[in-house]
Image (cartoon, helix red, strand yellow):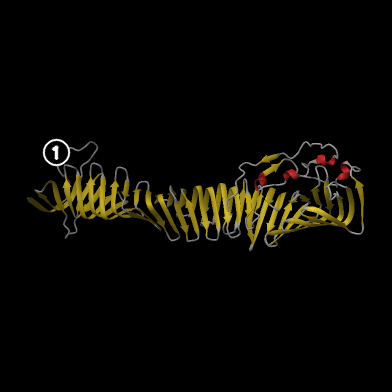
Amino acid sequence: MFSFRGLEITVLFLLFTGISFAQQTTVIHLEQSHSAIRRESMPDVQIIFGNLEAGQQVRFRHDGAIMYCDSAHVRGRDNTFNAFGNVRIIEGDSIFIYGDYLFYDGNTRIARLRRNVRMLHNNSILTTDSLNYDRDRDLAYYWTGGKLQDGENTLTSVWGQYSPNTNQAVFRNNVRLVNESMRMYSDTLRYNTETGIADIVGFTHIIHNDETNIFSTKGWHNTETEQSMLFNRSLIVHTDGRTVTGDTLFYDRQNHFVEGFSNVEMNDTIQQVTLLGHYVFFDELREFGFATDSALFIDWSDDDRLYLHADTLHLSKDSIYDVLRALHNVRFFRVDIQGASDSLVYSSRDSIAIMFGQPVVWSGENQLSGEVIRGYVANETLERIHIPRGAFVIQQVDDYHFNQISGNELTAFIHDGELRRVEVSGSAETIYYPVDDADSTIIGVNKTQSSHVNMFFVEQQIERIVLTVASSGTMYPLGELSGEELFLSGFFWIEEQQPRKPEDVFFRFSGNRHASSILRFRSAAIPQETADDGEQVPVRNVRPQPNR
């Protein structure tokens, strides 16, 4: 064994001369050491020491990187070395790596660091027990657990890799990203330390302040702006009972709004309502929701669900009261009542639903219409319908005969989902077909005029009509009247437009609702078809109803 010592070796020299390496590789240079020894048991190894008392370490340089250690084993023939104690790697002015042990291969430019490893790059700190840094591929990776700290964010995982040049990191297995306001759990995650954006590439669960939960398998989340773009039927759940799911969701937590695109479903489990559409927007602060493109509102607070469709649906809060606005081509279905109009407004302040624009309501086989229709709700059940102007009630007796009542104002009373009584006041007129109880044949035609009429119903059929004393009327034999004489002014019958099931609310009818009435009934003999008979045209993407 032999040894040599010097005060300081600062002259650059080749570790071993006359040795050729593979093409495009460069030799590791020793820039600084204090002493070196060679042992017979390790003839190919040169052991180099620094001067620890003087604070001087061994220093190597290779392709722009400087590496420090307390001591090293150098294998010149292999162009490699093992470094021990207080290991440091400095590359450029932004990459600093620390550890207790390093094996560096000058041919592959791979650094393998072990125990107490830290990698610093700009504002990011990566800590682990075992780290390999591939300088050629610009990748640092670990597989025994590690942590990346980036400003306010801390990411941990079993496996991870980081690219200093692109600032891009990839994490797998038990991934966790946390900061003061959020926790994110995932099986796979990509993260950019410069932008603070996490790319969701596997099942991910995000928790915001224990108030909002996000579940997604694809998308991205900006940890600085707290904005998320989510794909693949992602789900947002709020602790106040609201949930939103859709093919694509954009959630801005700081500005408190969510936008959904394609097959969006927003549920409120407290109010027990659902808002659906191919575009849905909800403002959490103003508690304002908006849906369009196959928009559908479902109230499932009662056993008999309400399904309401319109071109545009608005949900909002007026102080503490809920308000629903349905605009254009409104149609709704419930087992006990159905309706259609151009627009509808409902407020929980007074529990009144108001229908505008050729409104029509069906209760059983009874059709009610007017200029405006008001529905009064109590205990989530429709109790009364009020038509202040142009009231008209029709009930079909057979293919060409209809019981009719019209007047200035109408109030209909409903009990247990059935029409029980109708009051009409002001220029009240009726056409009524009495039926023989024995064989259900029509006895004749009763036409009356009165200032006030009460019509009573049993099982949705007219039982009797009560007129005021000051009234006039005539009972005609069946067949004596014909044509226009069998219809009150303003008659229209649109049974084909009545929604019979939830999916029917998506059907549209061409032309004016009243003009498309089946006017053939005005002929007492042969029905005459009109040019515009109200052809059904299904709206695209009639959606299935969500399960409850």
Which residue, given by chain and number where applicable, does mark 1 sit on?
Answer: 18
Judge by depth and name the residue closer to the eye, 479 or 425.
479
Q: Is residue 445 left or right of residue 414?
A: right
- In the picture, residue 483 is in which quadrant? top right
Judge by depth and name the residue closer to the eye, 104 or 165.
104
Numbered marks: total: 1
Judge by depth and name the residue closer to the eye, 528 or 489.
528
Asked whether the viewer can see residue 350, the reply is yes
Q: What is the crowding at mark 1: few (fewer than 14 residues within 10 Å), some, or many (at least 20)?
A: few
Name above or below for residue 196 compared with residue 513: below
Name the spot of residue 325 as percent of width and height, x first: 67, 54
Name above or below for residue 98 compared with residue 486: below
User: Which residue sits furthest bottom?
Assistant: 320
Judge by depth and name the residue closer to the eye, 19 or 238.
238
Secondary structure beneath dot 1 equals: loop
Q: Is residue 291 left or right of residue 143?
A: right
Residue located 27% across and 54% down the image = 98
Name the spot of residue 489 as percent of width and height, x first: 85, 47
- In the picture, residue 409 is in which quadrant? bottom right
Name the spot of residue 353 as percent of width and height, x first: 71, 56
Name above or below for residue 220 compared with residue 285: above
Name the spot of residue 266 as percent of width and height, x first: 57, 53
Could you tell me the amino acid type at mark 1? Gly
Asked whether the viewer can see residue 490, the reply is no
Residue located 29% across and 48% down the image = 133
The quadrant of the image that shows the C terminus is bottom right
User: Which residue sits furthest left?
Assistant: 1
